[in-house]
Image: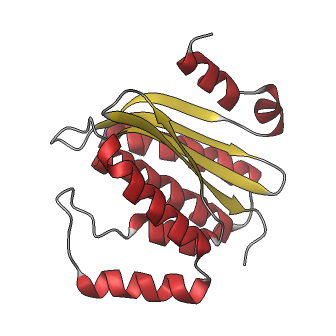
């Protein structure tokens, strides 16, 4: 079976569909597309989850992760559009947000190191790193200050799951999963 189809089949497993409301999109992610899908997901979540703080966290994580695609995809254009995969769903204990996009192979090692570092940090260390990034205020060429991944893990309190799928010598497909517990802090 084709690698891409096997990957999509894995994401859309029967278990996933039966346990939650998968919202899946693959394609160009523009500002308008982001607004549409975050609104759709927000509407579905508001029916299923009565806790406003959980809904706000899920929405915040969705926006941050979608912005990562539009800003950091190897194929992002100057107009703020990147191609990617966006999945939102629910399990009994948590909501999950999965994004996927093409990244240059040259950034894989640094990105993986950063994610592992964040996964190992406790709340205090994450707060200090966040504050340091804000104070440094150095914007990358893509317009971010490196706060997105830090902010998501601080808000959710959950480790990232991720994978890099090699496409060719120059590119990888980066899959990132964040979860938000259904029980508020």
* Quadrant containing the N terminus in the rendered view: top right
Residue 109 drawn above or below residue 156: above
**Residue 25 image offset from top left, x and y in percent:** 51, 30
Give the percent coordinates (x, y) of residue 133. Answer: 33, 80
Where is residue 158? Give x, y as percent: 66, 67
Q: Is residue 121 left or right of residue 149?
A: right
Visible residue check, residue 4? yes
The residue under the point 42% across, 81% down is 130
Name the outermost residue toward the top. 1
Residue at 62% over, 69% down: 156
Q: Residue at x 39, y 87 (%)?
A: 131
> Which corner quadrant of the image does residue 137 belong to?
bottom left
Q: How many discs appear?
A: 0
| x and y percentages locating residue 29 in the rendered image | 36, 37
31 with respect to 92 (left or right): left
- Which quadrant of the structure image shows residue 12? top right
Question: In the orientation shown, which residue stands out farthest toward the front?
Answer: 169
**Quadrant of the snapshot with the C terminus:** bottom right
- Left or right: residue 23 compared with residue 90: left
Q: Residue at x 49, y 86 (%)?
A: 127
Could you say which is closer to the camera, residue 35 or residue 23? 23
Using the image as rendered, state which of residue 114 and residue 99 is in the foreground: 114
Determine if residue 29 is in view. Answer: no
Say which of 29 and 72 sits in front: 72
Q: Is residue 49 above or below residue 54?
A: above
Which image quarter: residue 18? top right
Colouring style:
secondary structure
- When the figure is inspected, residue 179 is found, relative to residue 169, above or below; the finding is below
């Amino acid at each position: 079976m084709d690698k891409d189809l096997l990957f999509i089949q894995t994401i859309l497993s029967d278990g996933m569909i039966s346990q939650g409301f998968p919202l899946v999109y693959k394609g160009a992610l523009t500002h308008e597309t982001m607004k549409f899908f975050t609104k759709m997901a927000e509407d579905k979540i508001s029916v299923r989850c009565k806790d406003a703080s959980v809904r706000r966290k899920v929405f915040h994580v969705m926006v941050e992760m979608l912005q990562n695609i539009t800003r950091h995809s190897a194929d992002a254009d100057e107009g703020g559009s990147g191609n990617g995969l966006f999945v939102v769903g629910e399990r009994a204990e948590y909501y999950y947000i999965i994004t996927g996009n093409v990244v240059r192979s040259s950034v894989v090692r640094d990105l993986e190191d950063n994610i592992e570092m964040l996964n190992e940090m406790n709340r205090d260390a994450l707060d200090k790193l966040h504050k340091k990034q804000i104070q440094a205020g150095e914007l990358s060429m893509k317009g971010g200050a490196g706060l997105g991944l830090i902010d998501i893990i601080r808000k959710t309190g959950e480790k990232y799951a991720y994978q890099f799928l090699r496409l060719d010598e120059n590119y990888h497909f980066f899959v990132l999963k964040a979860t938000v517990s259904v029980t508020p802090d």
